[in-house]
Amino acid sequence: MKGWLALSALLGTVAACTTPEQRPHAANDPYGELGAADLYVQKGVRYMERGALEVALEDLTHAVELDPANSDAHDALAILYEKLGKTEEADKHFREALSLNPANYSAFNNYGRFLCNTGHPQDAMEKFEVAYSTPLYPQPWIPLSNAGACLRRAGRTAEAEAYLRQALDKNPNYPPALLEMAHVSLEARQYLSTRAFLQRYQAIAGETPETQWLGAQTELALGNVGEARRLADRLGEAFPDSAEAVQARRLFGKH
């Protein structure tokens, strides 16, 4: 089978509930051969990843025109419409993707993430459950992590932790789950655990404004003021225009 659609890199972890998912082969061809519509989906996804959204829209729209019954094309187009802020169009194409192929578990994951981000966490959980509960789904840690992230943002931290631990049981090195567990631990005031999850995340995925800011808050809570200031300074140097750097400057009285 030919790998062709790496949607997992498109929106990242849950700022968008964690991760859009990949498809292992063309949905309408069990032998993995790509049709014309699939090739346009592949092109569109690549343009989307590069931020060329207008070109991506042309390719993905053409893919749907070539093959209106292509579930993956509708899934990818839905993600693009979400990025463009066109939630009604996104919802329509997610529904069409699932209607055309009820076994498109990556679309269930993507639609769940979309529903969570648009304020429908309970509906989102139902979609995630379809994806992670089937033995046919190759990467259950992705919807499990998305479910945990969705619940954390809904204020259901204890429930979120259970899902995230399930995700890490299945893939101990999955960065989005590690980062979410750092958030959960910080909210639970388990600061040593927060530090440990951040270290595990950064060893795999590197530093980001989010991890630097979480680290500064964690060290401050542990009473390590000097280390917290050092992390805040490094955040300001590496990511000066980030929202996290602004928060760090406010916390430590810098302008």
Image: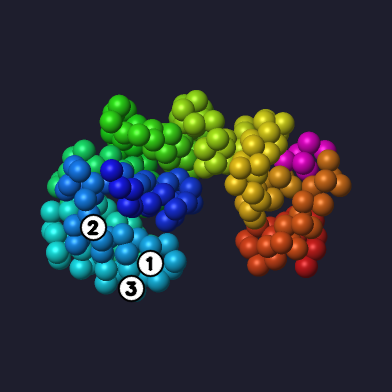
- Judged from the image, the secondary structure of the residue bearing numbered disc 1 is helix
The reply, left or right, for residue 130 in relation to residue 19 is left
Query: Which quarter of the image is occupied by the C terminus?
Result: bottom right
Specify whether residue 130 is painted magenta: no
In the rendered image of this protein, does residue 50 appear above or below residue 212? Answer: below
Residue depicted at 48% across the width and 48% down the height:
13
Tag 2 secondary structure:
helix
Q: What element carries label 3?
A: helix
Residue position for label 3 = 55
Which residue is labeled 2 in the image? 38
Whole-percent x and y of residue 96? 18, 52
Q: Would residue 53 appear left or right of 211 to someone viewing this image? A: left
Q: Residues within 10 Å of mark 1 (few under 14, many from 20)?
A: some
Amino acid type indicated by mark 3: Val
Residue at the extreme bottom: 54
Colour pattern of the rendering: rainbow
Residue type at mark 2?
Answer: Asp
Q: Is residue 219 visible?
A: yes
Find the magenta span and give its range.
Answer: 218-223
Residue assigned mark 1: 47
Which x, y percent locates residue 44? 32, 64
Disc 3 and disc 1 in contact, CB within 8 angstroms: yes
Residue at left offset 62%, top offset 61%? 243
Q: Residue 208 carries which label?
A: none
In this rendering, does residue 89 appear at all? no
Label whose residue precedes the other's in the sequence (2 or 1): 2
Q: Which of marks 3 and 1 is nearer the N terminus?
A: 1
Q: Nearer the viewer, residue 104 or 146?
A: 104
Closest to the camera, between mark 2 and mark 1, is 2
Q: Residues within 10 Å of mark 3 (few under 14, many from 20)?
A: some
